[in-house]
Image: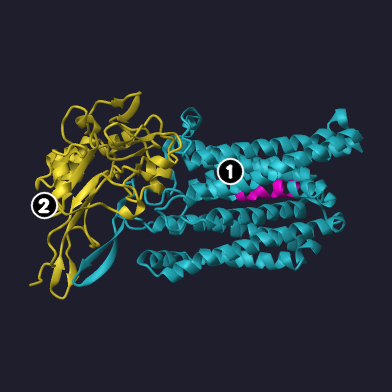
Amino acid sequence: MRYCMVIDLDKCIGCQTCAVVCKMHNSQPPGTWWNRVFTQGAETHETAIGGDGQFKMEFLPLSCQMCDNPACQRVCPTGATYTNENGVVLVDYDRCIGCRTCMAACPYGVRQFNWKDPKQEKEQMGYHYGHPFDVKEDPNRLVYTQDRPAGVVEKCTFCAQYVEKGELPACVRACPGKARFFGDLDDPDSEVSRLVRTKQVHRMLEQYGTEPKVYYISSSRQKNIGEG
Amino acid sequence: MKKKYTALAVGALLCAVGLAFWLYQILQGMVITDLRNPFSWGLYMGTFEFFISVSSGGMLLFAVAYLWRVEKLMPFAKLGSVVSLACVIASGVAIMTDLGQPLRVLKMLLYPQFGSPLFWDVVVLGLYAVVCVVAVVIQILPDTKKHKGDRKALAQRDARSRALAFVALPMMVLMNAVTSLMFAVQNTREWWNSALVPVDSVAVGVAAGMAIMLLICALTVGRENWPRHVDEFILMAKIAAVGLLAHLFFSFMEIVPLQWSNTPESRELLELVLGRYGWLYTLEMVLAAVAMVIFFLSLSGHSRRVTAFAGILTLLSAFSHRMMQLYPAFNAIPMNIPVTAGGETIHWTFPIATGVLEEGKDLFVRSYDYFPSLPELAVNLLPFGLVILVVALFLVLDKRAEAKGA
């Protein structure tokens, strides 16, 4: 089994719901964002780009690309970053030594370091959210805990706490435009496999050979807003 | 002798301040540094690499003296081994201060990942430290009470040193090369991903290593003894000059293809190297060039002050080089995609969350102007203090042993 995500850029409305639910369900401390959405080419989110009466505004959500050939995993000196049997790239928070080599290696800039103690930080800000129970994978790898230790790296887990129970990741469930799809890429009958086969899809920064398992259905809006 | 005790006190003070702030960092988290998600390695990593370079000199001197039987260099082999050991300890401490979870460092041995360049580095660094310790032991053994004045012990020292030199030289090269592989293998960072990076690291190691040996000699040999060793210092200066020349050549060879390829990525990188951080790059190159000229012209050998000056220039250049490895690499963010609008294509960088919510500062950034914070600078005194402390301690004890022997 290889879990994969497909994001339809035509359907993304840039509302940031996925980013916010991701933050809340995964108990991310202030300043940490596993999932981000920005307007492509724009200095400020939700501002159009272009000129001379030709403008466009397209959004790009970005989180861990769950690579089949993850640069982060290859450089990790302790094996804290690993790929599980479902093809999900995870961080064992008990094993990470906080060297941040994975952050330098990841081309997507999605890895987030805990510069402060997340628990203290959330308490100071009055934040109370997130799945409350630890998730451990065999053999005893801590892949989700509400309060990660300070000084370790964290990132998207495809919502390990929900997927292990057969539920969908929070961002997929919450997307109001139904732009996100999740499933098994090895199953030819899954919706994600069908979308990857039948739609025009692309993956981010393929030139680095990372083989991401997040596919983007390319925008069909070839023309700029304002073009005839 | 008084100077050496002053150095001991300074070293101890720097260590105490560094340790106190490191403890503060462990308690408060690495938020006390100016490091953030988009710029996740800085002063500590630069210092780690700097001491890797600097530690090469002593072992190189040791190897040159015994492999090629350069007898006039042999009296400096003992000091060389101690300096190398001190620097390799300093590099280890510097990288420890950079870890978010320093107490978990043993996990690298419990769960070794043989494919990780960081693991290779730990292995090579450990082996190099062992070689340094063995070199120190071999060198000081004839000074011990038991062997004092024993000719057989001196002959044994030379034979053992020669045998060790066969290992020490390749280990020195390997340590520099493997440490830089941590950067060179990362194909997502164009500034690092080059076969020249490990080779250049060896060149910087030769230059900076010899420079610290010359600097320590200039500070400790004394005005009256200086002329007696002038040939040795000229030879050491020439070795440093060759290292600097090689470094300048490799640096030039890095820039030419970048200029030639003229892609959006190479243009962005060039703008960072020669534009935004041009001042640091110029500093690195100019200091190296001036020191190289001084060393090549043998100006340094004849004057303690000029030797010390050129040594300091080389060390500053080496440190700038290490920081220069980081600045352009982290600010050329790989998540940079072409976006077309209004008939024009621009290269747009996807913003990265800094990881810390700070008043008056953007949370999502496309580049990051890293500048070490005061607590970070204070933590970084620790490795420098350790080198001063270990070398000064050795000089004091060596002098005492010498006095007892006389």
Residue A11 in picture, x, y percent from top left: 11, 52
Regarding residue B11, the answer to whether it shows in the image is no
Image mark 2: chain: A
Percent position of residue A181, x then y: 15, 42
Residue that extends furthest to the left in the rendered view of this protein:
A228
Q: What amino acid type is highlighted by mark number 2?
A: Lys
- SS category of the residue bearing label 1: helix
| Residue A158 at least partly seen | yes
Q: Which residue is mark 2?
A: A11
As for residue B406 lying within the magenta part, the answer is: no
**What segment carries the magenta color?**
B53-62
Q: Residue furthest front?
A: A188
Judge whether B308 appears above or below B299 on screen: above
Name the residue that disc number 1 marks. B91
Element under disc 2: loop
Q: Given the image, on which type of amino acid does mark 1 rest? A: Ser
Judge the density around disc 2: few (<14), some (14-19), many (≥20) Cα neighbours within 10 Å.
some
Q: Residue at x 38, y 43 (%)?
A: A72
| Chain in cyan colour | B
- The colour one sees for chain A in the rendered image is yellow
**Which label sits on residue B302?**
none
